[in-house]
Image (spheres, rainbow, N blue to C red):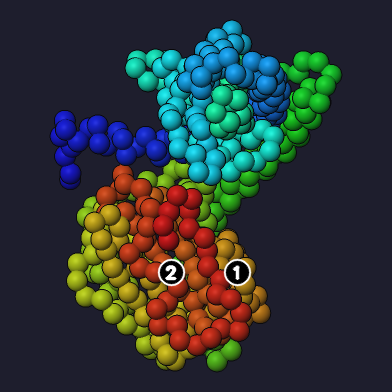
């Protein structure tokens, strides 16, 4: 057995956590419903928020671009008007350029834009330098805009840019760059004017909008989750109550009922549930009483018949012993009487055993037993019957196959399986196999006879059931052997299962725990025979394993 150390505990807990979470997810309808509502709501809110943000951002940017173009157009017109021929000869080019830049910078400070002046530009011109608003980096003007302006395009050219500042100025921010050209009268050169309009306010507005939408979306999702919890609670709580009441009824507390309040659909469901419970309780009580009467009747009749049967047996033994002095007809009658008395005694013994199972009075006398010895002992005891039928019986596995069990009951199970197989087998014979592992020990009995029709694998264990009612009884069976075998297997906490297919024979599998207090979850032998080579005319029929098992 593996022993966990202190260091292994966190790892073991981490491994169990996903399984526990998955189990909780599967079991909690409320969690799945609320999660689905919240996820879908989050998708809707996120999509709407993204669309609103996108529309507002497009509107702000478009408005800022239009305003920037209008402002640049106005400023360029004012500059051209001031540089007209009336005042063009009063200053030298350098002074005229300095006054131009100072005027634009002053107007930019007042109206919130930056200025970059470069020139002269154009074919054959030699640039004399770049002048900008203090701390503005001339590289803020994109190269594409420079080329468009310097190539002499008419009107205004614009593009988006990122305004950078030098010398410890403000942080870079997005903006709109607009370019145009003016002619300086003093030297007749063309100079490029670039207006840089910051979009910091628009950026702050969008950030604030995103924050507001995020907070509003989270609050809305919390409200939706709360509403979903409230609604699901109103719907699921009555369902949970119905489940608990149903579990109590299933455990035998037939008087349990649901509380009915109101007149809505849930109340009508509770009323219908209670009516169904009343009907079930009435029917169960009738069935329990009928079953009790039947068990009492069977038990009483079985006990009462033993006394007259003993007397009849004594008389039959006398007649059977003296049959040699009778005429042939009387002698044959004495033999038939003896055979029928044997069958009658077997039937009474089986009825008494069934009565003990029904009354819960059957107990186990446990000891460690080797199922291999039990199987060989049963095969030896049934050898005369097998020889009379011409059916060989073989035990294929040698070894020790231990199980803590009641040897008498296990031997009865194996004897019932072997005699049943002999009664149905063909000359191919009957094979008995055994196997065991650390938890279970199994035994299979395989025959190659007529097999079982679909649906009969679960019926073979019914009391007094026979696959072919018209079939001649060659082994004197009572029809209770497999039913008693199944009860014996269940008493041990084990399995007794059947497989069969028409024309392919049948196989019965007994699986017992190695220790009587351990549950059986699997079997070391397959239920479907490994030697099956023919293709059956219909799908093989098997008995499903109990819940929670690995067949």
Task: Using residue 518 as the reference point, say whether residue 325 is left or right of it.
Answer: right
- Badge 1 marks a residue whose secondary structure is loop
In the picture shown, does residue 356 fall above or below 534? above
In the picture shown, does residue 471 fall above or below 141? below
Relative to the observer, which residue lies in front, 168 or 79?
79
User: At 16% across and 30% down in the image, what residue appears?
Assistant: 6
Relative to the observer, which residue lies in front, 495 or 245?
245
Residue beneath disc 2: 527
The picture places residue 59, in percent across and down from the top left corner, at 71, 26
Residue beneath disc 1: 456
Q: CA distance from mark 2 to mark 1?
A: 15 Å
- Between circles 2 and 1, the one closer to the viewer is 2
Could you tell me if residue 338 is visible in this image? no
In which quadrant of the rendered view does residue 279 lie? top right
Residue furthest front in the image: 89
The picture places residue 15, in percent across and down from the top left corner, at 32, 39
Q: Quadrant of the C terminus?
A: bottom left
In the picture shown, does residue 342 fall above or below 321? above
The picture places residue 65, in percent across and down from the top left corner, at 66, 27
Dot placed on the residue nearer the N-terminal end, 2 or 1: 1
In which quadrant of the rendered view does residue 503 lie? bottom right
In which quadrant of the rendered view does residue 19 lie? top left
- Badge 2 marks a residue whose secondary structure is loop
The picture places residue 536, in percent across and down from the top left corner, at 56, 83
User: At 60% across and 25% down in the image, what residue appears?
Assistant: 185
User: At 39% across and 50% down in the image, what residue appears?
Assistant: 493
Task: Using residue 118 as the reference point, say whether residue 166 is left or right of it.
Answer: left
């Amino acid at each position: 057995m593996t022993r966990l150390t202190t260091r292994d505990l966190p790892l073991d807990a981490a491994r169990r956590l996903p399984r526990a979470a998955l189990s909780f997810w599967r079991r909690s309808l409320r969690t799945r419903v609320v999660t689905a509502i919240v996820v879908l709501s989050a998708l809707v809110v996120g999509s709407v928020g993204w669309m609103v943000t996108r529309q507002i951002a497009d509107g702000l940017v478009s408005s800022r671009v239009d305003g920037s173009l209008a402002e640049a157009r106005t400023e360029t017109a004012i500059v051209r008007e001031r540089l007209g021929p009336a005042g063009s000869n009063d200053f030298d080019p350098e002074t005229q350029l300095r006054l131009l830049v100072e005027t634009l910078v002053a107007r930019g400070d007042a109206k919130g834009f930056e200025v970059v002046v470069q020139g002269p530009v154009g074919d054959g011109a030699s640039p004399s330098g770049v002048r900008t608003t203090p701390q503005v980096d001339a590289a803020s003007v994109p190269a594409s805009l420079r080329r468009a302006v310097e190539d002499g395009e008419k009107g205004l050219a614009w593009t988006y840019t990122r305004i950078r500042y030098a010398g410890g100025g403000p942080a870079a921010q997005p903006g709109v760059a607009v370019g145009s050209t003016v002619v300086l009268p003093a030297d007749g050169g063309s100079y490029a004017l670039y207006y840089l309009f910051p979009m910091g306010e628009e950026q702050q507005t969008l950030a604030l909008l995103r924050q507001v939408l995020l907070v509003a979306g989270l609050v809305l999702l919390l409200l939706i989750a709360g509403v979903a919890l409230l609604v699901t609670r109103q719907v699921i709580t009555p369902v949970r109550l119905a489940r608990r009441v149903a579990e109590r009824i299933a455990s035998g507390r037939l008087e349990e009922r649901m509380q009915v309040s109101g007149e809505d659909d849930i109340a009508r469901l509770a009323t219908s549930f209670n009516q169904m419970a009343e009907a079930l309780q009435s029917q169960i009580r009738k069935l329990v009483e009928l079953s009790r009467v039947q068990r009492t009747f069977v038990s009483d009749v079985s006990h009462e018949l033993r006394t007259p049967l003993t007397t009849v047996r004594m008389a039959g033994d006398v007649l059977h012993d003296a049959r040699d002095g009778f005429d042939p007809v009387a002698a044959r009658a004495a033999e038939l009487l003896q055979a029928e008395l044997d069958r009658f005694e077997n039937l009474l013994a089986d009825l008494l055993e069934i009565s003990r199972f029904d009354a819960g009075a059957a107990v186990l006398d446990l000891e460690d037993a080797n199922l291999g010895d039990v199987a060989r002992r049963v095969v030896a005891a049934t050898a005369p019957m097998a020889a009379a039928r011409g059916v060989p019986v073989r035990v294929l596995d040698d070894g020790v196959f231990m199980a803590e069990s009641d040897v008498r009951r296990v031997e009865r199970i194996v004897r019932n399986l072997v005699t049943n197989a002999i009664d149905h087998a063909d000359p191919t014979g009957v094979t008995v196999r055994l196997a065991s592992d650390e938890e279970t020990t199994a035994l299979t009995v395989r025959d190659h006879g007529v097999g079982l029709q679909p649906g009969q694998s679960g019926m073979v264990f019914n009391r007094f059931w026979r696959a072919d009612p018209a079939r001649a009884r060659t082994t004197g069976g009572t029809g209770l052997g497999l039913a008693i075998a199944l009860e014996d297997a269940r008493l041990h906490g084990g399995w007794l299962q059947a497989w069969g297919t028409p024309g392919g024979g049948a196989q019965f599998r007994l699986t017992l725990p190695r220790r009587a207090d351990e549950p059986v979850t699997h079997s070391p032998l397959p239920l479907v025979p490994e030697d099956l080579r023919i293709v059956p005319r219909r799908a093989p029929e098997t008995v499903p394993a109990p819940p929670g098992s690995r067949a």
